[in-house]
Amino acid sequence: MLIENDEAARHSTASLLAVWNCQVRSACGGAEALQMLRSSAPWPQVVLSDFQLDNPMDGLQVIAALREAAGHRTIHGILLTGDVNPGVAQRAQSQQVKVLYKPLRPSRLHAALADLTGLPESPDSDFLN
């Protein structure tokens, strides 16, 4: 699942994930993501969330809420952010969420997803750089 409040960033990231044969559902914020997951299956293996969202919850709070709603299911988290404040990274680490800094290089996102899910190596390695 991809949570990003910037429509252009959400679309481009979802398109990139689709190239890698990832099934992507996207939402612009936490409330939409929770509603989407409660109303349809399957639950995601990974939640990619921007840190600064246009709602009361930040990306780490959204990931925590989705994990709580998932109950016994394991949901990995990846936080996408341009915020280099050490407090953000510390919060993410305490919640076992990977942090990827913007501007986001596709190769870093692919490596993080491969580490968490076993995503196979991309056939077009030039596309990742």
Image (tube, grey):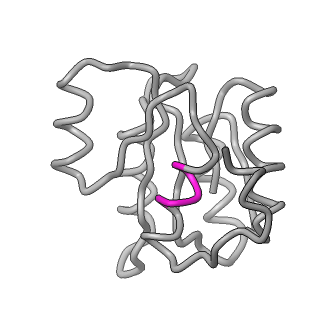
107 or 99: nearer the viewer = 107
* Residue 109 horizontal/vertical position (percent): 55, 51
Determine the image quadrant of residue 85: top left
Image quarter (top left, top right, bottom left or bottom right) of the C terminus: top right
Image point (52%, 49%), residue name: 108
The quadrant of the picture occupied by the N terminus is bottom right
In the image, 70 versus 3, the foreground residue is 3
Report the magenta residues as a range.
108-112
Q: Is residue 55 magenta?
A: no
Q: Nearer the viewer, residue 90 or 127?
A: 127
> Chief secondary structure of the magenta span?
helix
65 to 69, vertically: above or below: above
Q: Position of residue 59 (x, y in %)?
A: 44, 36
Q: Is residue 104 above or below residue 32?
A: above
Residue drawn at the location 20% of the way across and 38% of the way down: 91
**90 left or right of 40 in image:** left
